[in-house]
Image (spheres, rainbow, N blue to C red):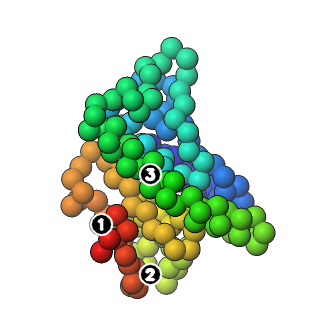
Amino acid sequence: LKYSIPGIMSMNVFGINFVGSDICGFIGDTNDNLCQKWTILGAFYPFARNHNAIYQKDQEPYRFSDEIQANMRRALRWRYALLRYFYTEMYVNSIEGGTFWKPLFFEFPDDPATYNNIERNIMIGPSLKFSPMIDEVDAATQPFIFPKGVWCDIVNMK
């Protein structure tokens, strides 16, 4: 889960924007918490798919509890709500070059704080900041960074 973030960012720097990793992992069995967090993160990948090896534990969303399914469904609805933005930014990058999924410091290079905790502070295109919960800790302890500017919480509409 955590290693997928710098991997996707690296591919974007190399000019390959449409990449992702196998949501919930490919080799080895997943668990409920890991697959839930990975599905939420993966919903914001440039390329998203839940995929695993043969003879591994099934990991389709319907195989999990109602609560986990609801969280996965919410994440996938966000993906579909943002598809026009994703497609537009991918198109612009295909014509002009650039990165789609990138570290926060690509958009805010003058803020030294943006060079820290790169995997928790992702820019999707120039306008959308995504901060995934990737550890087994409370949200209050996650080091999310918001550089100076106007930020809108699109999840809570604030």
Residue pointed to by mark 2: 111
Q: Is the C-beta separation of discs 1 and 2 under 8 Å?
A: no
Neighbor class of circle 1 (other Cα within 10 Å; few <14, some 14-19, many 20+) is few
Mark with earlier residue (3, 1): 3
Task: Name the secondary structure under disc 3.
Answer: helix
Which kind of residue does numbered mark 3 sit on?
Answer: Arg
Label 2 or label 3, whichever lies nearer to me, is 3
Picture coordinates of residue 92 (x, y %)?
Answer: 71, 70
Measuring 21% from the left and 61% from the top, which residue is drawn there? Answer: 140
Which kind of residue does numbered mark 1 sit on?
Answer: Asn
Residue pointed to by mark 1: 156
Mark with earlier residue (1, 2): 2
Query: Is residue 1 toward the left or the right of residue 21 in the image?
Result: left
Picture coordinates of residue 7 (x, y %)?
Answer: 57, 50
The image shows residue 44, relative to residue 126, as above or below, that is above
Q: Which residue is situated farthest in the top direction here?
A: 55
Res 73 quadrant in image? top left
**Cα separation between marks 1 and 2:** 26 Å
Residue pointed to by mark 3: 77
Which kind of residue does numbered mark 2 sit on?
Answer: Asp
**Cα separation between marks 2 and 3:** 32 Å
Residue 150 shows in the view: yes
Measuring 52% from the left and 74% from the top, which residue is drawn there? Answer: 127
